[in-house]
């Protein structure tokens, strides 16, 4: 966190009566000291907060089952969420800006592209080749590859590519350098020169026009970051990869709709671009979290920056092909997402992010984390008392909206194609399979909220094993 954590532009934004009132009762320096004394307790501080939230969720659900007006509360809550879901569904996303022309390239900003890699010999060569051959002036962008003490051929591949491409800089980190992926990115950030900083996973795949389309998204001074749509490269491999493809389409749809309604745009790690000034104001990448992208998302919004979303072109990535790999990956994502709320919860009401962003954020905390966790005591109480499952209306609304979002999201990714009735039926079937696939989150979330109350994950570099799906591996 930096001294400029609270925006100085609050007066220029929409009036927020809650935030304004709370700000009168607080002092920024005391807030900063309080934050550091709480957050930097480390994992034990998170464990206590996670345990408190878990007990509160169980206590509220049990109470709703025992009082006569419990059903009324649930139906009112379902109605409020339903109204927000309807508003999301009719929101109109902004059209993307025009791609940079050849004339525009003469005054284009400098861009730094960062790739942190650990044992990525199967895929790293393909990505570096693509990044070093983008349709953008060679003197206006640079590529940084950070090898985090790999034990395979990653260092050798990167060193040979550095001899081939002058815009490629390679940094080799020693053993136990610390900080994981965030530490690797922070280590080279001060050496980079770009006004915009892009981050990619080693298994990414990009198109030559990527920077021509991303850079115009930063035309607005309020835009602090842009996330490029992610797509699965090996979609047709099995049920799990097809499910991930539908999940990515749902995520892209929700990102666009939430931003269109004045809500929260989120970073997804691979294919994220951040304005350097915004990154510096927010304290760079957090080395005390397991998902640096989700953590940075919250800090950018708390500092009143906007996050944009680019539908075309997409950034390809390799989907996991085994249920066990999916379980470990999604557990890490879920814990990192939940972790940021435990770390920054008090600032959600004290920052100048605005009412619309705040309401959107709280709604998705409810649907993504609280509801799946609350379904466990709800099911137990319903079974014991032979009662109607109390939260079923809210759960039904969630799944219905997820199906609609998945269907419309897939449609958008195929907007440039001529679709017939058979294609629409196929998309409907793909969305239904995707919805079944998404049920794994209903298990992951309760497990994560329970485990974090007992034993938070140890901070270390945890990566998904990549095999080069959908690409040819370079052999040097």
Image (spheres, grey):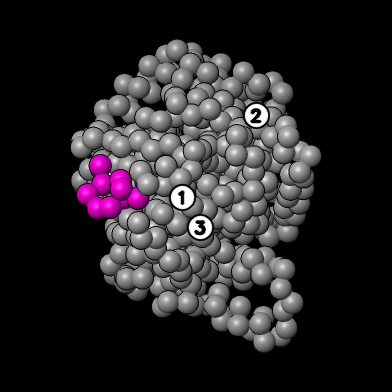
Q: Which residue is mark 1?
A: 128
Instruction: Return the residue nearer the eye: 126 or 185.
Output: 126
Left or right: 359 as drawn, with respect to 474: right
Q: Which residues are magenta?
A: 149-158
The tag earlier along the polypeptide, 3 or 1, is 1
Query: Quadrant location of residue 303?
Result: top right
* Residue in the picture at 79% in, 39% down: 103
- Name the residue tied to disc 3: 205
Crowding near the residue tagged with mark 2, few <14, some 14–19, many ≥20 C-alpha atoms within 10 Å: some
Q: Verify whether residue 17 appears in magenta.
A: no
Q: Which residue is mark 2?
A: 16
Separation of marks 2 and 3 at Cα, in angstroms: 41 Å
Q: Give the x, y percent position of residue 281.
A: 52, 23
Q: Secondary structure at mark 2?
A: loop
> Residue 129 at x, y = what percent?
49, 52
Q: Nearer the viewer, mark 3 or mark 1?
A: 1
């Amino acid at each position: 966190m930096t001294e400029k954590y609270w925006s100085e532009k609050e007066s220029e934004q929409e009036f927020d009566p809650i935030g304004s009132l709370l700000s009168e009762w607080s002092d920024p320096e005391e807030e900063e000291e309080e934050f550091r004394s709480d957050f930097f307790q480390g994992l034990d501080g998170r464990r206590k907060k996670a345990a408190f939230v878990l007990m509160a969720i169980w206590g509220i659900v049990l109470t709703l089952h025992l009082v006569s007006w419990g059903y009324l509360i649930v139906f009112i809550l379902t109605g409020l969420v339903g109204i927000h879901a309807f508003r999301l569904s009719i929101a109109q996303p902004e059209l993307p800006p025009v791609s940079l022309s050849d004339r525009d390239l003469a005054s284009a900003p400098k861009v730094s592209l960062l790739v942190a890699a650990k044992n990525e010999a199967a895929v790293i060569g393909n990505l570096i080749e693509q990044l070093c051959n983008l349709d953008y002036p060679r003197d206006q962008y640079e590529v940084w590859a950070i090898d985090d003490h790999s034990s395979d051929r990653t260092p050798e591949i990167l060193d040979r590519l550095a001899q081939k491409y002058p815009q490629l800089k390679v940094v080799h980190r020693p053993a136990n350098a610390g900080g994981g992926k965030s530490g690797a990115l922070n280590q080279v950030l001060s050496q980079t020169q770009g006004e915009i900083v892009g981050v990619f996973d080693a298994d990414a795949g990009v198109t030559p026009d990527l920077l021509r389309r991303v850079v115009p998204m930063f035309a607005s001074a309020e835009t602090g970051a842009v996330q490029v749509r992610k797509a699965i490269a090996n979609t047709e491999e099995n049920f799990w990869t097809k499910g991930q493809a539908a999940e990515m389409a749902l995520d892209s749809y929700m990102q666009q709709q939430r931003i269109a309604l004045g809500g929260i745009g989120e970073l997804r790690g691979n294919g994220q671009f951040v304005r350097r000034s915004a990154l510096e104001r927010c304290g760079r990448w957090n080395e005390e979290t397991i998902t640096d992208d989700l953590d940075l998302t919250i800090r950018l919004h708390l500092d009143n920056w906007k996050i944009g979303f680019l539908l075309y072109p997409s950034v390809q990535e390799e989907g996991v092909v085994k249920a066990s790999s999916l379980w470990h990956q999604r557990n890490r994502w879920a814990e990192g997402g939940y972790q940021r709320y435990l770390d920054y919860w008090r600032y959600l009401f004290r920052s100048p992010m605005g009412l619309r962003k705040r309401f959107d954020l709280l709604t998705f905390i409810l649907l993504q984390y609280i509801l799946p966790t609350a379904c466990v005591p709800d099911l137990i109480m319903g079974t014991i008392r032979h009662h109607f499952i109390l939260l079923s209306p809210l759960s039904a609304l969630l799944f219905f909206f997820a199906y609609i979002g998945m269907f419309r999201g897939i449609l958008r990714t195929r907007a440039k194609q001529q679709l017939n009735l058979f294609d629409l039926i196929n998309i409907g079937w793909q969305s239904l399979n995707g919805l079944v696939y998404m049920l794994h989150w209903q298990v992951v979330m309760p497990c994560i909220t329970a485990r974090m109350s007992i034993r938070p994950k140890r901070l270390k570099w945890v990566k998904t094993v990549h095999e080069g799906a959908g690409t040819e591996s370079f052999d040097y």
